[in-house]
Image (cartoon, helix red, strand yellow):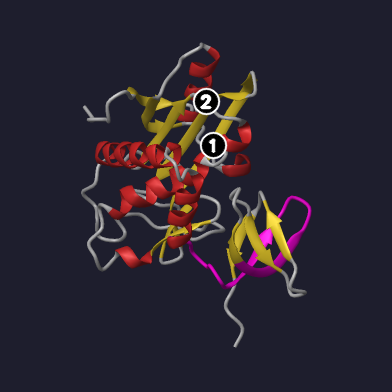
Amino acid sequence: MATLPQGYGLRSFTEIDSTNEEARRLGDAGETGPIWIVAESQTAGRGRRGRHWVSPTGNFMGTLFLRPQATPRKAAELSFVAAVAVHDAVESFMPPHLRPGLKLKWPNDLLHEGRKLAGILLESSGIAGNELAWLAIGIGVNLAYHPENVEYAATSLAALGLGDISPTDGLEALATAFDRRIRQWRDVQGFAAIREAWLARAAGLGGPITVRLSDETIEGTFSGLAPDGALELRLASGEIRHISAGDVFFRPAPL
């Protein structure tokens, strides 16, 4: 049984459609949370924009269900809280020589040497007053396995020589790191401190990137993170364009 920070519940499943779907069911049933939902396998795991998320037994698959008591705009900052927490947790398993390769790709993927190691998916529903009714923060970490022949190259902790980390180990590290980071987010400095921590771990900052949007693909330089978490893209004209949603691909720097 995993040991979690005080105040967090836990629901564990051998198999489930997806932990985010269970969070949706809890929200519809009036559950208050916060509750970690974990599963050994998922039959309908998904990533951003409805993509299929490979969910083999041995990897970490979990969702944190909570009622953030925040407006939808404010609650969106929890994407970055989660990303920094995932970085913290995975870094805690790594020997010093592997840690420099661990980076965050906007908005919330975790990479090691440019290969995807973990992903995060936030889903929510409804407004209670002016606050989000509930939020599901789905997290998948490639502990034992990673997919091959995918658009964005992936890796796993096992592939990095760290094959003895169990999903329970992952849950305990993630729960501890998230609790620490959400307390930081709720403190005086708020999102500014999380934004600073995210930028210190950012992949591709200052370099050329391609951003694929729903209706166009644009190129520029990843120049920073806006105060609300939007990606700041410097175009060839010098204009700064703020991107609130899109897929980022890194490009080689020009010679």
| Residue nearer the viewer, 55 or 135 | 135
| Residue nearer the viewer, 220 or 141 | 220
Question: Is residue 251 something that shows in the picture?
Answer: yes
For the point 60% across and 66% down, the residue is 222
Give the mark toward the camera: 2 or 1. Answer: 2
For the point 35% across and 36% down, the residue is 179
For residue 3, above or below residue 252: above
Question: For the view shown, which residue lies furthest in the top direction?
Answer: 29
Residue 238 lies in what quarter of the image?
Answer: bottom right
For residue 58, above or below residue 149: above
**Is residue 169 rendered to the left or right of residue 18?**
left
Q: Which residue is mark 2?
A: 69
| Start-end of magenta stretch | 201-222
Crowdedness of circle 1 by 10 Å Cα count: few (<14), some, many (20+)?
Answer: many
Work out how far the residue at label 2 is from the one at label 1, CA to CA, in angstroms. Answer: 16 Å
Disc 1, SS: strand
**Kind of residue at badge 1:** Leu
- Tell me residue 134's x, y (percent): 54, 24
For the point 39% across and 27% down, the residue is 37
Q: Which residue is mark 1?
A: 122
**Of the image marks 2 and 1, the number of the one nearer the N terminus:** 2
**Kind of residue at badge 2:** Gln
